[in-house]
Amino acid sequence: MRFSSDWLWYARRWTIESWHRVLKSGCRIEARQFGSLERFVRATALFAVISWRILYATLLARNNTDLSCEVLLQPVEWQALYCHTHNTKHPPKQSPTLQQAVLWIAMLGGYLNRKGDRPPGPTVIWRGFLILHEITKMYHLLRQNE
């Protein structure tokens, strides 16, 4: 029984390693100067959630291909993503699947989506989310005047 329990934890090792990589490389937590322990703790809590969201998007899109992207994205986010990706002003009434939305986000982050490419990983999804954040802000500003 001990072997089984140890094996389950070891099988999760790569997921945990990916989360740490996003936290360290994507959020650049080690390069930041917080000035105090209180600031460090608050920032680490925020970055831990951001890292979790990136990893969650990566894994969920691979395993649950038919889920709506609204399990992860706010309506304004997926609408901005759709309009940007398809070069249109009018998003569809139906939200795209999570798998499709994560692919578009990864492509914003530099994923090439070639036939032989592996599914997008946390690094390109992280970069894509940064760009999506800016696209969403602009989309929201432009929609306010309509």
Image (cartoon, rainbow, N blue to C red):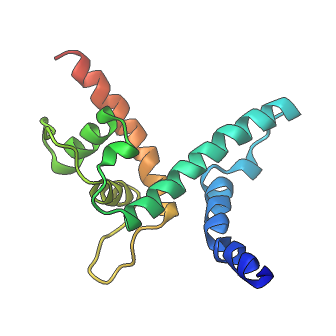
Residue 78 higher or lower than 30, as above or below? above
Compared across the picture, whether 127 is left or right of 138 comes to: right
Q: Nearer the viewer, residue 89 or 118?
A: 118
Task: Find residue 124 and report its horizontal and vertical position in percent.
Answer: 45, 61
Q: Quadrant of residue 91?
A: top left
Q: Residue at x 69, y 56 (%)?
A: 24
> Of all residues shown, which one is farthest toward the front?
1
- Regarding residue 140, the answer to whether it shows in the image is yes
Question: Which quarter of the image is occupied by the C terminus?
Answer: top left
Q: Nearer the viewer, residue 42 or 63?
A: 63
Residue 118 higher or lower than 96, as above or below? below
Q: Residue at x 47, y 63 (%)?
A: 59
Q: Residue at x 31, y 54 (%)?
A: 67
Task: Find residue 112 and report its horizontal and vertical position in percent.
Answer: 32, 69
Task: Find residue 53 and report its horizontal and vertical position in percent.
Answer: 52, 49
Compared across the picture, whether 133 is left or right of 115 comes to: right
> Of all residues shown, which one is farthest toward the top?
145
Task: Find residue 86 and report its horizontal and vertical position in percent.
Answer: 16, 49
Residue 80 higher or lower than 68, as above or below? above
Compared across the picture, whether 142 is left or right of 56 comes to: left
